[in-house]
Image (cartoon, grey):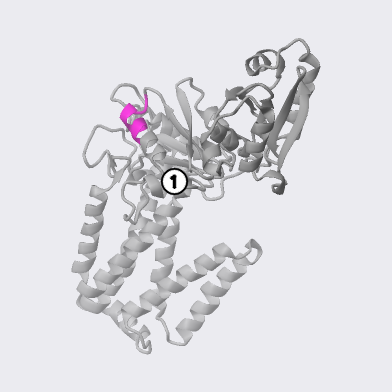
């Protein structure tokens, strides 16, 4: 008897019982209750439908396939004739490879097997439950569209095409994963995205050799340029409008089944500093919000390190009145400054992680207990100093001002690096940490493109990098596309 691997490499035979037995073996046979084999007669010949309950829509199968028998009397039992004259379902294709048939059936399509034909007809009958389009959870805006991606790839592709209603929008559906295939859509705007960029993205996706890829989160880690870098090199967005803006700027977008967001590449440092509100608000407001955001990031990364450096190594630089207040507040604290601030950082993120994982109904109560009761008790017990609570609170607020969740987590690692160097070398250590971060950013790449583009290396660009000037000044060539044409900065 043929093994499973041999069956997957084989093709259909003209014998219907042999084909049914082979598919039954590959799909789990009678043990797998979700797989159904529906025998019936079509055009005077024996036929069998193969589908997975729950993944395929029973109504489509009954209405467009089984009902077609009434108009099949004058047709021959040939797959090509059935597709042209009998089957009423819009999307049909013929297939003879056993592995492809198994993969499509598992994905929700229905296979029609005919006695005497060595080809099956695969019909689009996907009808599995899916979450309706709703508001984004991590990228909420005050002004702008209020819909986000969902877990269904087809729905996400439709949302994206609603914003980019152009015949040049190309969506290539690729398959990743040998045992459990995951459909990935590579989206780009032809003649706007650089052809070399699109080819590189396609090459990296197709080069993934794993038995299963569960979504874009795993795929991103498999195709990124520098897996050991603390900052993300691809932008994750839940918003179709932002993904569409990136496509019009010459970037590519990756969508996948079971992933309620899009993966945008290449991404630069400035993409992680922008929010969708910036584009919908007037340019004065957008510029102000970006400056506030950059200031919050600077406080988040360097404020704790500066505090440790000044109190441990450069107390003479602190004003005398403030130095007296710090010394008085820390008089009864038994821990050194470094241990104190590391303890507070750990406690802050412990509360944050607990508030994220527990049920939503008690999340606010946990925040009140952690921030007020524990903080006040720690100060009263002389475990930490009051000024440190202010510093950690400002640090956390600055970190929350970052629009991208993954980028904010990367900043936490950068902050710990600055704290340790500040404790060891003082202000020189903080400056060294900043220099190392800048050098690392200069050497990073996103899908082969510089992470600090278009500032370093410098190239012509529009006035929408850090400052957001009026819209009528922003027409220019796409950032990552060919030099010809015009485009916009991503939102």
Residue 7: tell me if it is visible.
yes
Q: Secondary structure at mark 1?
A: helix
Q: Residue at x 43, y 53 (%)?
A: 406
What range of the chain is rendered magenta? 192-200
Instruction: Tell me if residue 73 is in the magenta stretch.
Output: no
Q: Residue 234: percent from the left, percent from the top?
A: 39, 45
Q: Residue at x 29, y 66 (%)?
A: 417
Q: Residue at x 71, y 16 (%)?
A: 86
Instruction: Tell me if residue 197 is in the magenta stretch.
Output: yes
Residue 47 located left or right of residue 98: right
How would you rate the neighbour count of disc 1 (Cα within 10 Å): few for under 14, some for 14-19, many for 20 or more?
some
Name the foreground residue: 159 vs 38. 38
Q: Which quarter of the picture shows residue 100?
A: top right
Which quadrant is home to the C terminus? top left
Q: Residue 375: percent from the left, percent from the top?
A: 49, 77
* Residue with the mark numbered 1: 219
């Amino acid at each position: 008897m043929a093994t499973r691997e041999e069956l997957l490499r084989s093709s259909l035979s003209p014998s219907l019982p042999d084909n049914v037995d082979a598919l039954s073996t590959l799909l789990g046979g009678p043990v797998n209750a979700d797989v159904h084999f529906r025998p019936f007669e079509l055009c005077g010949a024996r036929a069998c439908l193969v589908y997975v309950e729950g993944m395929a829509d029973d109504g489509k199968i009954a209405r467009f396939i089984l009902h077609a028998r009434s108009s099949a009397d004058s047709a021959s039992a040939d797959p090509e004739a059935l597709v042209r004259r009998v089957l009423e379902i819009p999307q049909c294709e013929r297939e003879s490879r056993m592995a492809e048939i198994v993969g499509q059936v598992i994905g929700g399509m229905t296979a029609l097997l005919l006695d005497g034909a060595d080809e099956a007809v695969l019909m689009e009958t996907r009808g599995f439950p899916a979450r309706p389009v709703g508001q984004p959870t991590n990228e909420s805006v005050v002004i702008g569209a209020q819909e986000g991606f969902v877990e269904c790839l087809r729905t996400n592709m439709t949302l994206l095409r609603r914003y980019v209603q152009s015949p040049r929008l190309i969506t290539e559906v690729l398959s990743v994963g040998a045992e459990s295939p995951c459909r990935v859509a590579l989206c780009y705007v032809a003649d706007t995205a650089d052809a070399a960029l699109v080819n590189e993205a396609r090459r990296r996706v197709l080069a993934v050799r794993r038995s299963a890829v569960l979504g874009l989160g795993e795929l991103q880690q498999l195709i990124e340029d520098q897996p050991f870098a603390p900052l993300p090199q691809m932008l994750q967005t839940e918003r179709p409008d932002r993904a569409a803006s990136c496509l019009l700027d010459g970037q590519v977008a990756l969508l996948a089944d079971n992933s309620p967001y899009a993966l945008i590449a290449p991404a630069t440092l400035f993409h992680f500093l922008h929010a969708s509100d910036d584009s919908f608000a007037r340019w004065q407001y957008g510029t102000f919000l970006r400056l506030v955001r950059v200031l919050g990031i600077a406080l988040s990364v360097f404020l704790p390190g500066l505090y440790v450096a000044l109190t441990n190594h450069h107390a003479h630089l602190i004003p005398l009145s403030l130095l007296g207040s710090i010394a008085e507040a820390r008089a009864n604290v038994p821990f050194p400054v470094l241990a104190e601030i590391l303890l507070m950082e750990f406690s802050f993120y412990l509360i944050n992680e607990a508030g994220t994982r527990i049920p939503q109904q008690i999340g606010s109560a946990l925040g009140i207990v952690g921030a007020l009761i524990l903080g006040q008790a720690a100060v009263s017990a002389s475990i930490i100093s009051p000024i440190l609570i202010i510093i950690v609170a400002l640090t956390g607020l600055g970190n929350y001002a970052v629009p991208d969740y993954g980028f904010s987590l990367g900043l936490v690692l950068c902050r710990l690096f600055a704290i340790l160097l500040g404790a060891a070398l003082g202000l020189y250590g903080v400056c060294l940490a900043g220099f190392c971060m800048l050098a690392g950013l200069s050497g990073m790449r996103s899908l082969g493109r510089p992470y600090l583009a278009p500032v370093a290396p410098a190239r012509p660009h529009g006035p929408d990098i850090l400052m957001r000037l009026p819209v009528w000044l922003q027409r220019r060539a796409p950032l990552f596309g060919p030099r010809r044409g015009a485009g916009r900065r991503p939102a």
